[in-house]
């Protein structure tokens, strides 16, 4: 039965004549899974075949010389691969050394995440550094010196100071506060040379922070 | 005598009948009301406790949620992202990573069901696609792929998968999805990238990204970029700023101010995806910061007829993020989405809070909750037809914030 896609579309749009409608419905009512016929004349089919062959030819047979050139180039590369490889390793090594040594990447001197600061547990204060952070605890002064982010847990209620130095103007920023026994606090040293801020929040109050900072703490400390 | 007695008995019977009638009214009416109370409000007190109050009406009277509401005592801090749908409450317990489904019964929060969402301790974005399906995007997990969870809240079954979005690279170490919008068999997502480190502080890429996925198979079809603003959609669990208008055009706001995108040199802007279109409408860009509002904004709600309410900050009244949520400085404006020259500041007290679901529009009335920091915690009614404002329900007690006001039941 000769029912085209166009005729079916016309049928669903309600534009068929009675004869066409009967034709489509007769086809719909059969169990035949016969492929819809394309309304193409033999001449059209031959023209399309020629077009397909033409484009295939252009992409394959006629392209062969160029591919050969590329192949030769690759072979040449392969023959020199030992030299190229050695040179690449040397150049990459030099770049890595230069970048890490000059400290231009923001992720240099990375301290392992969740690293506990040695000796910080002495006075009942546990200090854990976040990514890219450093800290030390001065027992006598009850002071946490840090840069980046630190997690501080105290097992006695006390007055604790947090201090961070701005590397741009060497000015020290400090925040002192009462901390409660058994609670965990997060201190963040944030900002650029214009606006620097030390933020200290107890774990219970983390939701006061902007979502960006909350997410950062969650990613660093798994809270 | 007999006649007199008959009369007395008759009177007693009538009185008894009336009494029974009154008793049945007083006992049944509140029961009916409790079944289908239309509104839900979430509060935090000045001592950090959170309460839910289900309200019959918002137009008048006084309530005290500490006395009459349900205390949320486990966990102590659910905060602002409690989701409400069709009488039920949903939140992700950040410690256990379980999505909890509950309801209020006899002034208590009852836990009814739960499902484990591994890695979803905090929702970045949450949206009910319909009455049954809750779609959650997880919070940022460094440079890893973002993931989503689609939960059937009837049987609490979950499907979790990765989102085919590029992970953060270069200086950016996290990303956020600000809005999710479903249109037919497509899901749109607004997102951007962020950095948080001691070298640079915290902030965002200077670009709004809008991804288009096929739904439900979640294949990424296209990503549009626009570098005129950033942080599209804000944090939808905290404050809303997306809607579809009567024509099916979808609007969303970007939030580059300091408490969200933290790229304040870029303007807060309103974007549009027109009904039937497959890309951002690049010809439309409502620059809120350059309008008469002249500030950053974080909330937007649709009033109808091209009008919307925008909740904007006052940069002259706060210094840092802490003052941003503590001090009253937020204003409400009525704007015309198609005419940026029109804006009308609502004559309301300055409002507090950076994360507040504080506007509910029903017909010609916008219910606006205000915390003015002086103990005046009220629902205000804005009648859009005559632009009339009046004070409605008053919230008594030591309330610090009215976090959420929303429909408890959809019908």
Image: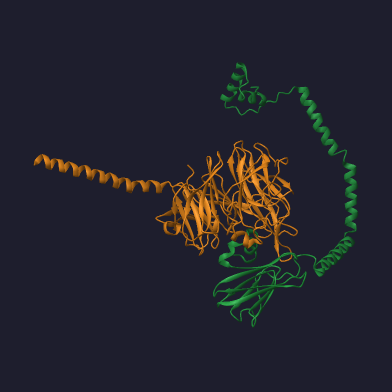
Q: Can residue B307 be seen in this view?
A: yes
Q: Which of A58 and A128 is in front in this view?
A: A128
Q: In which quarter of the image is residue A86?
A: bottom right
Q: Where is residue B252 in the image (x, y as percent from the top left)?
A: 64, 46
Q: How many labels does the image show?
A: 0
B393 in relation to A105, above or below: above
Q: Where is residue B410 in the image (x, y as percent from the top left)?
A: 49, 44
Q: Quadrant of residue A198?
A: bottom right
Q: Nearer the viewer, residue B264 or A216?
A: B264
Position of A158 compared to B58: left or right? right
Chain A as rendered: colour: green
- Residue found farthest to the bottom: A140
Q: Which of A82 and B198 is in front in this view?
A: B198
- Residue found farthest to the left: B1
Q: Give the color scheme: rainbow, by chain, secondary structure or one colour.
A: by chain
A180 in relation to B354, above or below: below
Residue at 47% over, 53% down: B394
B194 in relation to B33, above or below: below
Quadrant into which the N terminus of chain B falls: top left
Chain B as rendered: colour: orange
Q: Where is residue B350 in the image (x, y as percent from the top left)?
A: 59, 54
Q: Is residue A214 visible?
A: no
Q: Where is residue A168 in the image (x, y as percent from the top left)?
A: 78, 69
Position of A126 compared to B22: left or right? right
């Amino acid at each position: 039965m000769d029912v085209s896609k166009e005729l079916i579309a016309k049928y669903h749009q309600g534009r068929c004549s009675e004869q066409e409608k009967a034709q489509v419905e007769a086809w719909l009512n059969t169990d035949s899974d016969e492929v819809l016929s394309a309304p193409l004349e033999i001449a059209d089919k031959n023209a399309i075949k020629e077009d397909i062959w033409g484009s295939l030819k252009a992409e394959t047979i006629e392209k062969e010389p160029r591919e050969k050139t590329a192949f030769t180039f690759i072979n040449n590369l392969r023959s020199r691969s030992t030299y190229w490889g050695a040179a690449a390793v040397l150049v990459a090594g030099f770049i890595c050394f230069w970048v890490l040594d000059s400290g231009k990447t923001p992720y240099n001197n990375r301290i392992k995440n969740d690293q506990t600061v040695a000796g910080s547990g002495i006075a009942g204060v546990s200090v854990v550094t976040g990514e890219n952070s450093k800290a030390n605890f001065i027992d006598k002064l009850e002071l946490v010196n840090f840069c980046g982010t630190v997690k501080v847990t105290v097992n006695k209620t006390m007055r604790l100071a947090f201090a961070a130095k701005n590397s741009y103007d060497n000015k020290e920023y400090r925040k002192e506060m009462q901390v409660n026994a058994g609670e965990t606090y997060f201190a963040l040293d944030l900002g650029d040379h214009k606006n620097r801020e030390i933020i200290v929040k107890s774990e219970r109050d983390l939701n006061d922070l902007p979502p960006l900072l909350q997410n950062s703490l969650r990613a660093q400390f798994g809270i | 005598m007999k006649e007199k007695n008959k009369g007395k008995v008759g009177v007693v019977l009538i009185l008894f009948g009336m009494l029974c009638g009154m008793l049945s009214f007083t006992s049944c009416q509140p029961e009916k009301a409790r079944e289908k109370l239309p509104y839900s409000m979430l509060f935090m007190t000045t001592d950090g406790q959170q309460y839910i109050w289900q309200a019959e009406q918002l137009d008048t009277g006084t309530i005290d949620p500490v006395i009459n509401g349900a205390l949320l005592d486990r966990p102590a801090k659910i905060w602002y992202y409690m989701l409400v749908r069709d009488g039920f409450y949903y939140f992700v317990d950040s410690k256990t990573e379980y999505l909890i489904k509950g309801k209020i019964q006899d002034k208590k929060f009852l836990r009814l069901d739960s499902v484990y969402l591994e890695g979803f301790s905090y929702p970045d974005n949450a949206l009910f696609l319909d009455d049954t399906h809750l779609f959650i995007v997880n919070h940022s997990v460094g440079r890893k792929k973002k993931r989503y969870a689609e939960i059937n809240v009837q049987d609490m079954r979950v499907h979790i998968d990765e989102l085919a979005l590029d992970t953060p690279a270069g200086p950016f170490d996290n990303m956020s999805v600000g809005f999710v919008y479903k249109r037919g068999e497509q899901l749109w997502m607004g997102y951007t990238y962020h950095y948080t480190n001691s070298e640079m502080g915290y902030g965002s890429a200077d670009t709004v990204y809008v991804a288009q996925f096929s739904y439900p198979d979640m294949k990424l079809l296209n990503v549009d970029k626009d570098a005129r603003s950033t942080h599209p959609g804000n944090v939808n669990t905290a404050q809303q700023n997306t809607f579809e208008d009567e024509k099916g055009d979808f609007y969303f706001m970007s939030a580059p101010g300091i408490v969200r995108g933290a790229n304040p040199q870029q303007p807060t802007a309103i974007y549009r995806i027109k009904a039937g279109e497959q890309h951002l409408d690049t010809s439309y860009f409502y620059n809120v910061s350059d309008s008469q509002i002249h500030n950053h904004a974080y909330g937007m709600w649709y009033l109808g007829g091209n009008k919307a309410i925008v909740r904007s900050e006052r940069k002259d009244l706060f210094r840092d993020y802490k003052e941003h949520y503590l001090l009253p400085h937020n204003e409400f404006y009525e704007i015309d989405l198609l005419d940026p020259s029109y804006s009308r500041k609502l004559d309301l007290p300055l409002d507090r809070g950076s994360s507040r679901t504080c506007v509910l529009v029903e017909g010609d009335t916008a219910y606006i909750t205000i915390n003015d920091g002086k103990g005046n915690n009220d629902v205000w009614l804005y009648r859009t037809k005559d632009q009339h404002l009046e004070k409605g329900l008053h919230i008594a007690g030591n309330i610090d914030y009215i976090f959420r006001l929303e429909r408890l039941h959809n019908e």
